[in-house]
Amino acid sequence: MNTTATVRAERPPYDFSAITDQLFIAALPRARHVQNVRSLGVDLVLSMIWFAPPRELTRPPFELRRLPTIDLPLFPIPLWMLRRGVDAALPLLDARGRFLVYFRPGRHRCVAIACCILIALCIFHADAMAHVANRLTVACHAALPHPAPLPLFASSMARHSLLAASAPVS
């Protein structure tokens, strides 16, 4: 038997974690995974890495948002980048859409953005992190984000909400 055919036949299905009914976290999708992503009913794909995704993820029914950033202890994810991801996701959540955040295995970026989306939904940052950790099944379960940016993001969201609430309505 051809070993290449055997390896392809034994590949596991695309590994993802359902954080909520609408939010999924997954490893870097390859072209062979696009059908699996499509079967999730995903509308928005948030890419947190520098590498370009498969072309199929840039075409309908998907909308792709690229948020390439690094996540290192000395260079944490900038708050404005987390905010961009949350701003893209919130209207979709209101419309009951679904979205996927993907990463390179072992990285913290998509877990951080998932926590920030839950924080934007008025979930306390420690509870958001615990919820994501409990729902994470993909290979990055040990890659929880550095907790320091989450309280900062929560206070940033609170300030933004207060400013929006005090703005005059036109």
Image: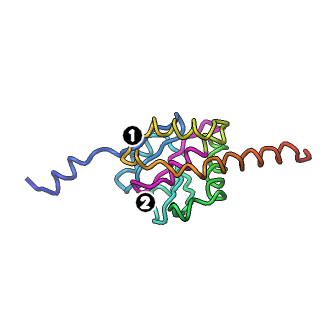
Q: Which mark is residue 3?
A: none
Q: Is residue 58 visible?
A: yes
Q: Secondary structure at mark 1?
A: loop
Say if the magenta span includes residue 147.
no
Q: Quadrant of residue 74?
A: bottom right
Q: Which residue type carries mark 2?
A: Pro
Q: Could you tell me residue 63's position as x and y percent? A: 56, 53
Q: Is residue 19 left or right of residue 154?
A: left
Q: Residue at x 61, y 48 (%)?
A: 150
Q: Could you tell me residue 160's position as x and y percent? A: 77, 48
Q: Residue at x 66, y 58 (%)?
A: 80
The mark tally for this picture is: 2
Per the image, the residue denoted by label 2 is 54
Residue placed most toward the observer, 109 or 143: 143
Q: Which residue type carries mark 1?
A: Thr
Give the Cα separation between the discs numbered 1 and 2: 23 Å
Colour scheme of the picture: rainbow
Q: Which mark is residue 137?
A: 1
Q: Quadrant of residue 98?
A: top right
Q: Residue at x 65, y 44 (%)?
A: 90
The region drawn magenta spans 93-116
